[in-house]
């Protein structure tokens, strides 16, 4: 019997872009790479945000595509749509953030993001800021 890959983390766009730009926050690169090893995915919204960034040149877009291929992409399923509607009805949250939060909640994943304030009110969502300095 083969082993099935386990996914633990959902990366927000800012984590992906931070890694691509080699953000210098103490410990960030190590935390990001450890999350990749543990199992990571992105929401389809994160793929759109990262690849749709107008600042890409051919090299940076290719790097982003390569990084995104290292993890799974969670599609906009009916359950994610319903969870997104519930979140938007209950909280003041932008649509992309609601989709990302709904994706994490539906899949039972921890969200890795710099934007804690965008998500901290959402009940049941586990948020980790990989950019924060940890003692």
Image (spheres, rainbow, N blue to C red):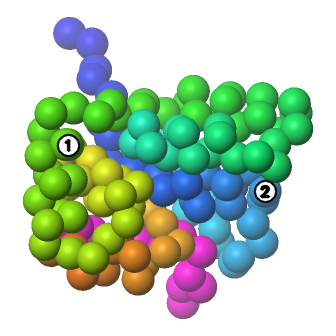
User: Residue 114, position in %: x, y?
Assistant: 53, 72
Q: Are marks 1 and 2 in contact (CB under 8 Å)?
A: no
> Would residue 84 be found to the left or right of residue 131 on screen?
left
Q: Residues within 10 Å of mark 1 (few under 14, many from 20)?
A: many
Residue identified by numbered label 1: 80
Give the residue drawn at x 77%, y 72%: 24
Give the residue drawn at x 58%, y 34%: 68
Q: Secondary structure at mark 1?
A: helix
**Was residue 132 drawn as part of the magenta stretch in this picture?**
yes
- The picture quadrant where one finds residue 1 is top left
- Is residue 49 visible in the rendered structure shown here? yes
- The picture quadrant where one finds residue 133 is bottom right
User: Residue 37, position in %: x, y?
Assistant: 49, 43
Does residue 88 sit above or below 122 in this rendering?
above
| Stretch of the chain drawn in magenta | 124-135
Residue identified by numbered label 2: 21
User: Residue 69, position in %: x, y?
Assistant: 57, 27
Compare residues 75 and 16 and report the one nearer the observer: 75
């Amino acid at each position: 019997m083969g082993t099935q890959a386990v996914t633990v983390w959902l990366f927000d766009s800012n984590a992906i872009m931070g890694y691509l730009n080699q953000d210098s926050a103490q410990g960030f690169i190590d935390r990001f790479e450890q999350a990749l090893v543990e199992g990571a995915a992105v929401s389809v919204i994160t793929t759109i945000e990262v690849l749709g960034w107008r600042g890409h040149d051919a090299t940076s877009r290719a790097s982003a595509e390569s990084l995104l291929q290292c993890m799974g992409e969670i599609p906009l399923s009916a359950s994610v749509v319903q969870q997104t509607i519930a979140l938007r009805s209950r909280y003041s949250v932008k649509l992309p953030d609601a989709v990302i939060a709904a994706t994490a909640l539906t899949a039972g994943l921890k969200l890795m993001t710099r934007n804690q304030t965008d998500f901290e009110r959402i009940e049941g969502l586990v948020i980790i800021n990989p950019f924060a300095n940890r003692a």
